[in-house]
Image (spheres, coloured by chain):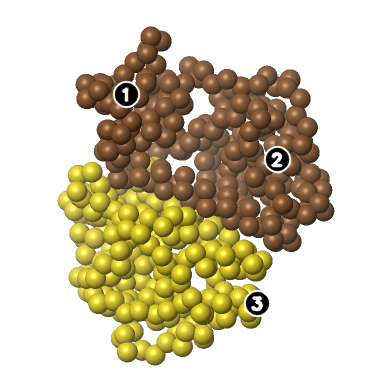
Chain colours: A yellow, B brown
Amino acid sequence: MYKIRHCPLSCSVDLKLVLENMDDFKNIKPATFEEIINISHIKEYQKDSILYYENDIVDNVHYLFHGLVKVYKINKFDNEVIVNLLHNYCANESNPPLIDYHTFLSNNSFFNILCLENCKILSINVESFKEIIKSDPALSLNMLNRANKIIEEQEYIININMIYDTKSKLASLLNKNYDVFNMLSKKVVSQMLNISQETLSRSIKKLKDENIIGFDNNKKIIIVDEQKLRSIL
Amino acid sequence: MYKIRHCPLSCSVDLKLVLENMDDFKNIKPATFEEIINISHIKEYQKDSILYYENDIVDNVHYLFHGLVKVYKINKFDNEVIVNLLHNYCANESNPPLIDYHTFLSNNSFFNILCLENCKILSINVESFKEIIKSDPALSLNMLNRANKIIEEQEYIININMIYDTKSKLASLLNKNYDVFNMLSKKVVSQMLNISQETLSRSIKKLKDENIIGFDNNKKIIIVDEQKLRSIL
């Protein structure tokens, strides 16, 4: 169902080395860096385990070192609404995504977080982290950049759910990352776009009929006319 | 249609005094404060004037000193979707709301901004502002707090539009600020909740039938059972 590659959990991670290369911790003082290390730990989660449920008390912020997590809410009709999918092949090779910025705002989680694959996740104690941010100007600027990225992501979610019609929603997801699209089942894509699977199939057919997308030999979607795709947004 | 009180434009505003009391500028260095003053100016806008349209180039961030503005987008069906309504009675008496945080992220505006009343608006040159933020740790921490508030507001918008059913949407707006609700026409409320006016009327009736809300002698909504209202969220 999810064909995202990622390192085996046995892949060795040097916490210090990974943290040194993370955007959130660049240019900070050596003493700040040591403090962050002291409140950090790495934990492994088995596939299908829940990191936490909505409204759970959460004491840590989490970065995804390896694996794939689903960030979702349940609406009033008991349907799952996927707000984000985060994946990381290997912390040694890329800047690990922050899973739950909301933890900086409140100890009660805003989302449900599920591990869709075996995951390796960094936890940092949030109360201590917030104090450390105040003590190092470089770190507070990094976290301001991080907050700005979260705002941009949320703007994308608002566009998808309030402004776009179904065709634009689909075009937007394909334009943002059609690799991710090909990794996911139609069920998951429809949950991400908040539409039914039938509507998704119709929209894919429409884009194909207009020669905007096509399929390769492995039945994976390819983008045929990128300019036309962008014009829909 | 909009019965929000605000000071007349003739109300005198001491820029220095107002800025000193604003959350975004508290605890900053005197030199930083002077730099902010130097890139700030106040401008008056007549009722129904557009501050800017979506995708316009914007060089300034704006704070609302007096008046009422509508922040909105147009969806693919040419319907107006109101993302926010900001109002400020008088800058001398309250912390003026930031109208357009997005300007920190991109020079292209994300929203349309319309003055629903005569407005007095503070403009601060965004490129200079961004440089000043980097030079004063207290200011960067203030702006991190500001970004966190924006993230919370956007979470509210996401809940309203993706998670809640119509009844919960309405309950959420009433719970957040039923004064604002009473100030607005049904058309504007329905645009804020992204539902039709008929659906809005039905939902109001439902909440009344359940004795959660009622009407006072001026036909304004009053909350009868706050606990029951919150239980819907």
**Residue B131 in sight in this render:** no
Q: Is residue A189 left or right of residue A158?
A: left
- Parent chain of label 3: A
Vertical side of B52 occupied by B29: above or below: below
Residue A25 percent across, percent down from the top left: 57, 74
Residue B224, disc: 1
- Parent chain of label 1: B
Residue at image location 35% in from the left, 41% down from the top: B160
Q: Which residue is mark 2?
A: B21
Give the quadrant of residue A34: bottom right
Label 1 secondary element:
loop
Residue A29, disc: 3
How crowded pointer 2 is (Cα within 10 Å; few <14, some 14-19, many 20+) is rated as some
- Lower position in the chain sequence, tag 2 or tag 1: 2
Residue at image location 27% in from the left, 37% down from the top: B232
Give the quadrant of residue A133: bottom right
Vertical side of A126 occupied by B86: above or below: above
Q: Nearer the viewer, residue A67 or B22?
A: B22
Q: Amino acid at mark 2?
A: Asn
Q: Nearer the viewer, residue B223 or A195?
A: B223
Q: Are marks 1 and 3 on the same chain?
A: no
- Eye-nearest disc, 2 or 1: 1
Residue at image location 78% in from the left, 32% down from the top: B14
Vertical side of A81 occupied by A163: above or below: above
Q: Amino acid at mark 1?
A: Val
